Image (cartoon, grey):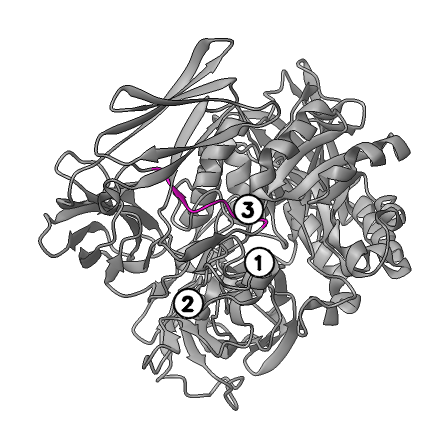
Amino acid sequence: MNKYLIVLFILIVQSAIAQFSSGRDQNFDFDWKFQNGKIQNATSKDFDDSNWRNVNLPHDWSIEDLPNQNGDDVIGPFSKNAVSKNATGFTVGGTAWYRKSFVLDKSTKDKKVFVRFDGVYRDSDVWINGHHLGNHPNGYTPFEYDLTPYLLEQGKKNVLAVEVKNEGHNSRWYSGSGIYRHVWLSVLDQNHILNNGLKVLTDNISTEKAHVEIRTNLDFFSKGLKLQTLIYNKEGRQILKQEEAIEQNSISQKLIIEKPHLWNINDPYLYEAKVSIIKGADILDSYVTHFGVRQIEFSASDGFKLNGKPVKLKGGCIHHDNGILGAAAYDKAEIRKVKLLKEYGYNAVRPSHNPFSPRFLQACDELGLLVVDEAFDMWNEAKTPGDYSNDFKDWWQKDLGGIIDRDFNHPSVILWSIGNEIPEVVDSLGYITASKLAEFVKMKDSSRPVTAAVPFHIPLIKGKKWDTTAPFFESLDVGGYNYSYSYYNSDHRKFPDRVMLTTEYFPPKAYENWKAVEENDFVIGMFSWTAMDYLGEAGLGLARIKPADDKAKGFVETFMDPDWPVFNAYTGEIDLIGNKKPSSYYLDVVWGKSPVELLIHKPITNGMKEINGFYDFPDLLKSWTWPKSIGDTLEALVYTQSDRVKLFLNDIEIAEKEIKKNEIKTSFSVPYSIGKMEAIAYKNDVEIGRNSLNTVGKPNAIRLKPETTKLKANGQDLAFIQVELVDSEGNIVPDSQLVKFQLTGQGSIAGIGNANPSEMRSFQNNELKLFQGKGMIVVKTSMHKGSLKVYASADQLKSDSCELRVE
């Protein structure tokens, strides 16, 4: 879905039955009944659900606390006995039911009524008044049903029932469970535009004019109707108008925008198209979408160009979950992800390995973040026993088509990805399937290239050579390489017209991958695994501390033994609550955002050793506060693209090192003492930058830092509040501390937690243990205006509070 013309929140009446006014898209998120477990007869309209829980959407039951919290086997939402183990972060799926009662008023008489789900994980079945509407196995793609034939007359109660089955081991990462994205009810005239039936294409773009084609697909039309198209600029001024008689179900209108304002990553300018079906003086239906005027080009000789200008993609992969909120796709959380990526220097994102929510893509449009829109993580061959491979043959066309139709108008989307690390990439079945999918994409949208992510390890696992991937690459316009930059030069010699993209790389190899991007026009960019920490694939990027005589020697051994408790992959450059990690500071140096960065390796106890895998950095902290290490020697790591680094302790030079050619890091062994540690970088004997760390004082207070202080009274708005442990000067103290919270006013706790990948706790209670001096509480508004106050306290520390306006 692209843009909602009217969003009307449900009016809750005493009988918990929602009344609706007519309108194209109405929010259908509120006042659902929920019950976990397999339940008989829950499809029936007359089933008694009075003792079920009341929930509002989006809702993810896998992030909620499990029952029977006794002992160490069950902690918060985590269980040692979870069927998918560390793959889903030891969280639990299962089967659950949702039911919603609603009444349609007289304004809906003779209308068509549809229900649309943005995403349900997974394998959902939907009934209306006991009639089975259908099954949808994919947990990430949108779907809708026509309710019209089965609705009761106006004024009578209708009941929608949804069974969600997240059973077995069906995911390699945290998926969440339930109706975790928005649901919409559409009440439409018999003459209406199809959902996702409005497509905007722009071409022949120059500074003087841009050609715009509006393609409108109608579900039904009668005689005497007109189609009216209005184009508005970003400031809301109408700049174009066109009308014509409706004579067929599919209509193409061509317009010209004079002196167009082009969309790009630094100036994401959006126009609005409003298309209406008109009968006389009446508007029967209106559909609104935003679009951007922009031109994209890909070639091996010139790389990627946006509006005729070369752009190298500084990208990151992310999963769909929202950390301590689970998979629940609140609008504010989706927007925040995009803001964080932009703030930390990314200009592109690869949503992995499935379609994300409409609001996420809308935020990419609004903030200027380029998107590789990815469809599938598997095709015919399974990666886990119960995954989408069981449904791919029957569903790929409908799911892929639905994604393209939904996301077509987003200017941020520059590539369609048809798959990630597909097991059959070296087999004839894979070659044939890739060709089918690519042809289908081109049939749906010829304006964007097709890519897929091909890894180095699948040929090795299957006993094949890398060259056996060549027939697979033939179906792609842009070749996606996962962890395979070493093949760029040899592949370029064999396939000089192939455009290449690093669809994944190990974060410690950012420098090597970025050099390949900078030095080769045919390599258009790179995407780290990952830009942000995520739930599941627990411990993938976590440095492990083991006894010195431990037999585990590397990544495979440590990852296959996930060392409960651990729930977070920890591969991100941004941590689970939105703060920079060591790999982010390293990336700042790689991309030239920072001339020099200084970090300290956490001390390792005698008799222990640190084991690092492909994804993880050493266990570093940007701190010179180590009270237990007085008199000890610590390791200081310096990242810089310079010739030479000098290290100073309390303004006294203590060491100097040359930076080796084609390297951007060095380390020093330094004695720890209280004060200031500073690294100064030089190039050609000229200082290019300095970075310092200062010892902070003892914990003195708790500090709350809300990211916003104004919220909407819509029952879904969120405030993300950083919680910090500070000294008397306001410096963050990187210690642990238990903080307790109280809330008063118009809201509740939506999520609470820290960035520690190994600290399994409830995400929904009123206390938080800080990690490295930081944590986060997320609060959600009610439907009532007023204020929301948050109080934080900790033993023997000054408390803090903040007040948010709910308007």
Query: Can residue 265 be seen by looking at this rendering?
Result: yes
- Give residue 436's position: percent from left, percent from top: 86, 54
- Residue 204 — which label? none
> According to the image, label 2 marks what residue?
565
Q: Amino acid at mark 2?
A: Pro
Asked if disc 3 and disc 1 are in contact, CB closer than 8 Å, the reply is no
Give the image location of residue 364, x and y in percent.
Answer: 54, 38
Secondary element under disc 1, as helix, strand or loop, is loop
Disc 3 to disc 2, how far (Cα)? 21 Å
Give the extent of the magenta segment: 614-622
Which residue carries the number 3 mark? 530
Which-is-in-front pick, marks 3 and 2? 2
User: Can you identify the residue that label 1 sits on?
Assistant: 553
Q: Nearer the viewer, residue 54 or 396?
A: 396
* Neighbour tally class for label 1: few under 14, some 14-19, many 20 plus, Cα within 10 Å: few
Q: Position of residue 173 (x, y in %)?
A: 56, 62
Of pointers 3 and 1, the one earlier in the residue sequence: 3
Q: Is residue 351 above or below residue 149?
A: above
Q: Is residue 633 above or below residue 231?
A: below
Q: Rounded to the nearest whole Å, what is the CA distance between mark 2 and mark 1?
A: 20 Å
Q: Is residue 291 visible?
A: no
What whole-number distance in Å separates the C-alpha atoms at marks 3 and 1? 23 Å
Q: Quadrant of residue 747?
A: bottom left
Left or right of residue 378: residue 125: left
